[in-house]
Amino acid sequence: MSIISGKTVLLTGASRGIGVFIARALAKEKATVVGVARSQQGLDRVSAEVKALGGHWLGITSDISDINSLPSLVEQINQLVGPIDILINNAGIEIYRPFQDYSSADLQSVLSTNLLAAMELSRLVLPTMLRQGSGHIVNIASLAAKKGPAYNSIYSASKAGMFMWSDAVRQELAGTGVEISVICPGYVSEQGMSADSGVAIPSSSGSSTPTDVAIATIQAIKQNQPEVIVNQDAISEAITKLLLALWEIFPLFGDKVNQWIGVTKLNKIRAENQTPIAFQPSESRTMVIATPNGRISKEKNQ
Ligand SMILES: NC(=O)c1ccc[n+]([C@@H]2O[C@H](COP(=O)([O-])OP(=O)(O)OC[C@H]3O[C@@H](n4cnc5c(N)ncnc54)[C@H](OP(=O)(O)O)[C@@H]3O)[C@@H](O)[C@H]2O)c1
């Protein structure tokens, strides 16, 4: 899809981190951004920025891990701003633990937020995109989709699932005018889940910035790129691709590299320090829709 201007974009995870940078980039392209997240405050902050940059904005608070609520979310968006032209599955969470210490709720929470919600939203928007003969889905995965980092195994599984699901669907969509891209950043500095963790990112891991991820997302849409590895520069990107190819053949070499560059140690520290992530359930039970003309607030169907 070469032109984003005037398109309606559903962006999950729009309240903070990388999502804010993607929202700004979409606003500069003059898109209508439908930002979804659980935090009303976060969405309100982004709303002001998007409008100041010339984009149109609709913020909807919704807990996307509640998969059964997604059909009504998409229906509401269709009614308020029309069909979704571009879906960016960006919302994600991670929980660090030795695998045996994960609770069943941890597994469900990470897989629902990172993978099942992205699949369900895509399933819901695809029929209209196919009818229109145009549309683009962007899945924000991770390098963890390509090499599993220790103590973050469920996250890695969710991102690998997202990667392979995108790979298969791209082949189904060939020739339909509907496109799908998967974006794989490594560690992202400045803002987002890695930067906000308070633990130093290994310097030799070739991190990128949230701006790099936003630029990669816009380029992937405009140039219909199937897979994008986001890195700080072309040389780091080439080294990452070479290492990934080598790890396919020699997986134990990949394990060693993760130890040498400090990823395994870092994740162990995170697993030891991580307290369960909790979100105010009262906030996720209420769906609040902020429109340019005011705010409609109502209880979500349980
Ligand atoms: N940062 C990195 O180093 C890095 C590297 C590779 C890939 N990524 C991927 O990039 C994406 C964005 O990450 P980030 O670093 O920006 O993370 P972040 O700063 O933690 O932001 C995550 C976003 O997802 C939203 N979210 C989480 N759970 C949700 C739920 N149940 N329902 C609705 N929204 C939810 C959050 O909003 P609320 O809390 O308001 O709901 C927030 O807007 C993720 O998919 C992540 O896996 C990040």
Image (cartoon, rainbow, N blue to C red):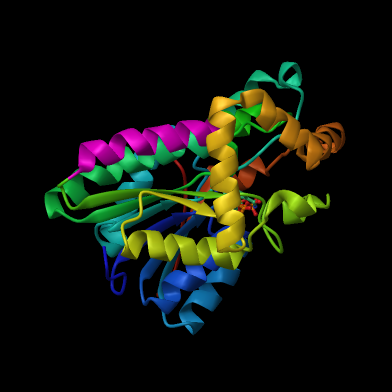
| Front residue of this view, candidates 293 and 137 | 137
Q: Residue at x 56, y 65 (%)?
A: 212
- Would you say residue 146 sits in the magenta stretch? no
**Which residues fall within the magenta stretch?**
158-174
Q: Nearer the viewer, residue 47 or 147?
A: 147
Q: Is residue 226 left or right of residue 237?
A: left
Residue 293 drawn at (x, y percent): 40, 75
- x, y (%) of residue 211? 57, 68
| Quadrant, the N terminus | bottom left
Q: Residue at x 15, y 47 (%)?
A: 175
Which residue appears at 39% of the width and 41% of the height?
A: 70
| Residue 152 sits in quarter | top right
Q: Quadrant of residue 96?
A: top right
Question: In the rendered image of this protein, does residue 208 appear above or below residue 151?
Answer: below
Direction from residue 104 to residue 238 in the image, left or right: left
Whole-percent x and y of residue 87? 36, 53
How many numbered marks does the figure carry? 0
Viewer can see residue 31: yes
Residue 131: horizontal and vertical position, in percent?
Answer: 13, 49
Res. 69 visible in picture = no
Q: Is residue 265 above or below residue 208?
A: above
Question: Is the magenta region chiefly helix, strand or loop?
Answer: helix
Could you say which is closer to the camera, residue 39 or residue 119? 119
Viewer-closest of 208 and 161: 208
Placement of 126 over or under 79, stated as above or below? above
Answer left or right for 32 relative to 112.
Answer: left
**Is 165 a magenta residue?**
yes
Name the residue: 53% across, 36% down.
Answer: 245
